[in-house]
């Protein structure tokens, strides 16, 4: 499981990763730990394998850094404010009528999403919907 308190990413690793992509806003130590806490809260119950604190997979480190960049841009952005379980869609324009978006359920439905983070971790976590997951090696 990913620690909530022991950093898995160094400042140097974060700078190298973001600089390679031309990101000018560098996440600081507080951003990195907030990003890591988001990843831990969202994915710790679904990892397909376990690792030691000093052997975090590279994709997980990159996901932490992506989350930290989001936090550096807008502190608190990964806190539950706009989430799938509370999203609404406009269904009537005369007298404004809103309806909740269907399909979001479970504890994960109340956490914000990042497509980049989900993509980085897709092969490392079980489906949020439950069921059987398969891990294949080349």
Image: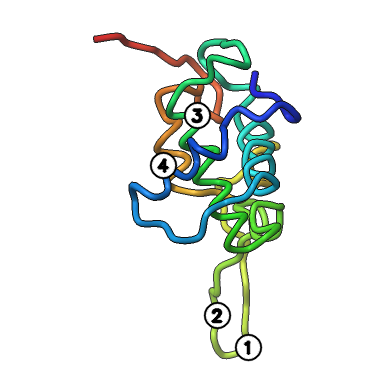
SS under mark 2: strand
SS under mark 1: loop
Residue that extends furthest to the left in the rendered view of this protein: 138
Badge 1 or badge 4: first in the primary sequence: 4
Q: Image height check: is 42 above or below 35?
A: above
Q: Image height check: is 22 above or below 51?
A: below
Q: Quadrant of the C terminus?
A: top left
Q: Which residue is mark 4?
A: 17
> At 68% from the left edge and 40% from the top edge, which residue is drawn?
33
| Numbered disc in front, either 1 or 4 | 4
Badge 3 or badge 2: first in the primary sequence: 3
- Do the residues under discs 1 and 2 have CB atoms within 8 angstroms? yes
- Do the residues under discs 1 and 4 have CB atoms within 8 angstroms? no
SS under mark 3: helix
- Do the residues under discs 3 and 1 have CB atoms within 8 angstroms? no
Q: Which residue is mark 3?
A: 60
């Amino acid at each position: 499981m990913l620690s909530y308190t022991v950093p898995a990413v160094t400042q140097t690793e974060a700078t190298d990763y973001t600089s390679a992509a031309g990101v000018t806003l560098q996440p600081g130590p507080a951003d990195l730990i907030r990003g890591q806490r988001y990843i831990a809260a969202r994915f710790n119950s679904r990892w397909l394998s376990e690792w030691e604190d000093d052997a975090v997979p590279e994709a997980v480190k990159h996901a932490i850094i992506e989350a930290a960049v989001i936090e550096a841009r807008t502190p608190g952005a990964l806190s539950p404010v706009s989430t799938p379980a509370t999203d609404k869609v406009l269904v009537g324009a005369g007298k404004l009528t809103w309806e909740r978006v269907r399909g979001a359920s479970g504890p994960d439905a109340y956490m914000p999403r990042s497509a980049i983070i989900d993509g980085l971790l897709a092969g490392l976590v079980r489906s949020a919907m439950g069921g059987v997951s398969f891990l294949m090696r080349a």
